[in-house]
Image (cartoon, grey):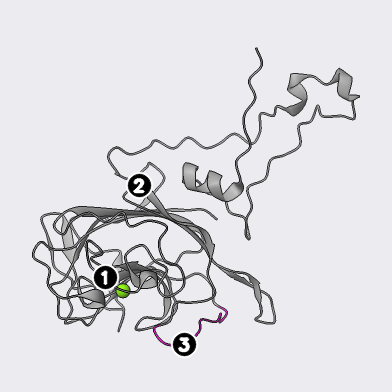
Amino acid sequence: MRTRFSTLSLPGLCALALAGCSAGPAPQSAPAPATAAARPAQQARPEDTEFYTPVPPIVTPGTNGSAPSDAVVLFNGSDLGEWVLMKDKSPATWPVADGVMTVNKAVGGIETKRQFTDYQLHIEWRIPEGITGTGQARGNSGVFLASTGNGDAGYELQVLDSYENKTYTNGQAGSIYKQSPPLANAMRKPGEWQVYDVIWTAPRFNADGSLKTPAYVTALHNGVLVQNHFALRGPTQYIGQPHYTPHGPAPIKLQSHGDPSPPISFRNIWIRTLN
Ligand code: MG
C-alpha cells in the first residue's frame, strides 16, 4: 500500500521541526530530482521524485535540553566568557553560582561577544520563588534576539513572571514586546525553570536602506508554541510605533530591567547558526 504524506505549511513545519527553514531570505529549497524528465504522467515512477543530495549533516542531539553537537554554547553554567556588559563591552559581571547566572541590576544588561543573523536559540530562565511586584514590575527581563544598540534597542522576546500576573497581553512572557502577544500562556510557577526555543530570521535590507524582508520569529515556551513565524514590524519599542533601521549581524542581549523586584536567573544557553 502506498503511503501518502499530508502537506504542512512552511511556518507549521518550522515550528514542528525547530529546523533552519525560513520563508524569508534563505528559504529551504529542494533540488529537482535528476530523473524527473518530462515523462508522461501515466509512466511516472516513484524514483522520479526522490533525490540523494544534498546529504544533511549529522548532528548529534542533546539530552534534556542540552546542546546538540553543532551548537555554540553561550553559557554552560561555569563562566560568562561569551558575554560582555552592554554599556561598555567590558567583561560581564553578573554573578554565576551553581550553574546559573543571575541578573546584576547594578551593572545593566549583558550581550554576546558574537554577532548573529539567523539562528536557533535555546535559553532557560527562572523567576525567583517569592518574587514581588505586579504587572511589568514582576521579574521583568528579556531576550533581545538582535541587539541594535544600548539600552532596550533591538527586538525583545519578553521575559516576565506571567503566572497569575496580569499585564497587557503583548507585554507578557512569550510576547514580542508590544507587537505580538503569545499564542498561549505556558508559564510555570516562580521557582521553576522556563525554557524558550526560538527560531530567528533576521531582517534584510536593500542597498538604499529600505526593508527587503522583515524579521521573523517562531518561539516555543516550555514546548508550547507562542510565536508562529511572526513578522516583526521593526525593533520593539516601549513608546511609539516600531520602524526598521538597517543593520547587519547583531549580538543577543539579556535585559536588566529597572523594576525593584528580585533579579531572575538564566542557564543552559546555546545557539545553532542557520546561515
Ligand atoms: Mg522586558
**Residue 135: % across, % down:** 24, 75
Q: State the CA–CA distance, disc 2 to disc 3.
A: 32 Å
Compared with 252, 9 (above or below) is above
Residue ID for mark 3: 240
Secondary structure beneath dot 2 equals loop
Q: Is residue 199 above or below residue 173?
A: above
Q: Residues within 10 Å of mark 2 (few under 14, many from 20)?
A: few
Residue 34 located left or right of residue 114:
right
Element marked by disc 1: loop
Q: Is residue 244 magenta?
A: yes
Q: Amino acid type of disc 1?
A: Lys
- The answer to whether residue 87 is above or below residue 122 is below
Number of numbered discs overlaid on the protein picture: 3
Provide residue 264's location: percent of width, then percent of height.
18, 67
Question: If you read the primary sequence from the N terminus, does the residue marked by circle 2 or circle 1 appear first?
Answer: 1
| Ligand 1 positioned in quadrant | bottom left
Residue on which disc 1 sits:
166
Write the residue at 21% across / 77% down.
Answer: 137
| Quarter of the figure with the N terminus | top right
Residue 242 placement (x, y as % from top left) = 51, 81
Q: Residues within 10 Å of mark 3 (few under 14, many from 20)?
A: few
User: In the image as oriented, which residue stretches furthest toward the left?
Assistant: 130
Res 219 quadrant in image? bottom left
State left or right for residue 4 relative to residue 130: right
Tell which tag, 2 or 1, sits nearer the viewer: 1
Q: Indicate the position of residue 14 as horizontal and vertical percent values.
A: 52, 47
Residue at numbered disc 2 = 223
Above or below residue 209? Residue 35 is above
Residue 240 vs residue 63: left or right? right
Q: Earlier in the sequence, mark 3 or mark 1?
A: 1
